[in-house]
Image (spheres, rainbow, N blue to C red):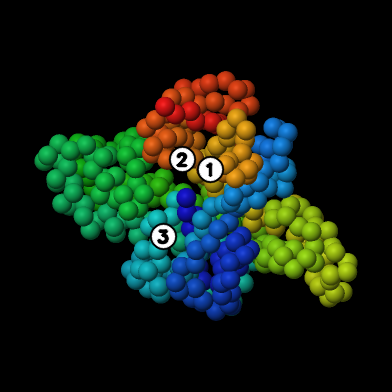
Amino acid sequence: MLLGLVGKPSCGKSTFFKAATLSDVLIASYPFATIEPNHGIGYVRVKALCKELGTRCNPRTGFCTGDVRFVPVEMMDVAGLVKGASEGKGLGNKFLDDLRQADMFIQIVDISATTDVEGREGEGDPVADVEMLEGELNKWYASIFEKVWDKLSRTIQSTKQDFAKSVAKQFSGLRVKEADVKSVLIKLKLNPENPTSWSPEDLANFTKTLRHSTKPMLIAANKIDKPGASENLEKLKLAFPEIQIIPCSADSELSLRQAAKAGMIEYVQGESAFEINEDKISEEQKKALEQIRENVLEKFGSTGVQEVLDKAVFDLLDYVAIFPAGSKLADSKGNILPDCFLLPSGSTALDFAYHLHSDIGDKFVKAIDVRTKQPVGKDHALRHRDGIEIMTS
């Protein structure tokens, strides 16, 4: 799974990325500070299974507080997008090519409206920022299809190929699946048997809807603690009621995580409070942290960064967390519940077996639910936070 951070220059993408991953990246107040994409690991929260089973996790990846398991997800921060990127303006071609492998987009919006459309200091418009980015992403998808559509549509029609299968194969690099194509055809009532008769408008609607299906997006309304941000947030919600919008302060989250790393405070990402270690902090540092407590945590319940990641994976992508768990709950090295994997909702016990290893899938006999100790078959649909032991021949 790969979460792609998108947005105009200087909207706070790199700050959000660093706050989520603590990766060492350049944060600057000028456009195109990011050129090469940054890759890092963020985490999503899962209610810990270990507590229910009367033990304590010892994860190989991520970490566990005893109440919450933090499961790693890959994140990518790419260059800022400007109007005309789909035609190559700015770093457009490179930016868009970097995004091909992303499973979804998190658009970082400067909700304080203190940067213009190209990321320079000045008057901004968050609604226009979202409209611009949506338009460029849709044009990008459309241009990819238009390059091959004439030949592809004629081939599909003349050879009676399965439309969904052919389109998914042609655009597998965009992570397009057959089910996505079929869903869009049904929604738009387009005829897959006669694609050469599609109008330019039909193709535009098809590519736009397919983009939303294969690259869904939510909005992180960043800099929510700045003057005027709350009013802009309401305007954005009215303009885009179909998009999930989450207020956040990436700069505050980064400050809290860095302070925690330095031992100045006790803080776990995503929480609504922190404790100050009085003997490890200066009065000036304490004052800055108290401002974050007052202006962000007490007003909004958290910095919002962790909530963005959680909702991206579990709401927008609709994934579930599954724990591989044997009868002793430990691996050969004694690690308790060492792993937790993220799978698409609707995955079966057999899907999970193959996710672990192809040999495990090939030799699947049955699975055991560690809570109930009851066996389940290969077609058993897994639920969020299931603990599953796979039995093989």
Q: Quadrant of the C terminus?
A: top left
Q: Work out how far the residue at label 1 is from the one at label 3, CA to CA, in angstroms.
A: 23 Å
How far, Cα to Cα, is label 2 from label 1? 9 Å
Q: CA distance from mark 3 to mark 2?
A: 27 Å
Return the x and y of residue 146 as percentages of the image width and height.
Answer: 24, 56
Report the residue that reaches farthest toward the top. 374
Residue at label 1? 341
Residue type pointed to by label 3: Leu
Q: Is residue 233 left or right of residue 91?
A: right
What residue is pinned by disc 3?
Answer: 99
Q: Secondary structure at mark 2?
A: helix
- Give me the residue at 32% from left, 37% from top: 182
Q: Amino acid at mark 2?
A: Leu
Local packing at callout 1 (Cα closer than 10 Å; few below 14, some 14-19, many 20+) is some
Instruction: State the mark number for residue 377.
Output: none
- Please tell me which residue is depicted at 49% across the width and 73% down the height of the picture: 34
Q: Residue at x 45, y 34 (%)?
A: 353
Q: Nearer the viewer, residue 100 or 243?
A: 100
Q: Earlier in the sequence, mark 3 or mark 2?
A: 3
Residue kind at label 1, given as amino acid type: Phe
State yes or no: discs 2 and 1 in contact (Cβ < 8 Å).
Answer: yes
Q: Which residue is more in the foreground, 316 or 359? A: 359
Label 3 secondary element: loop
Q: Which residue is mark 2?
A: 356
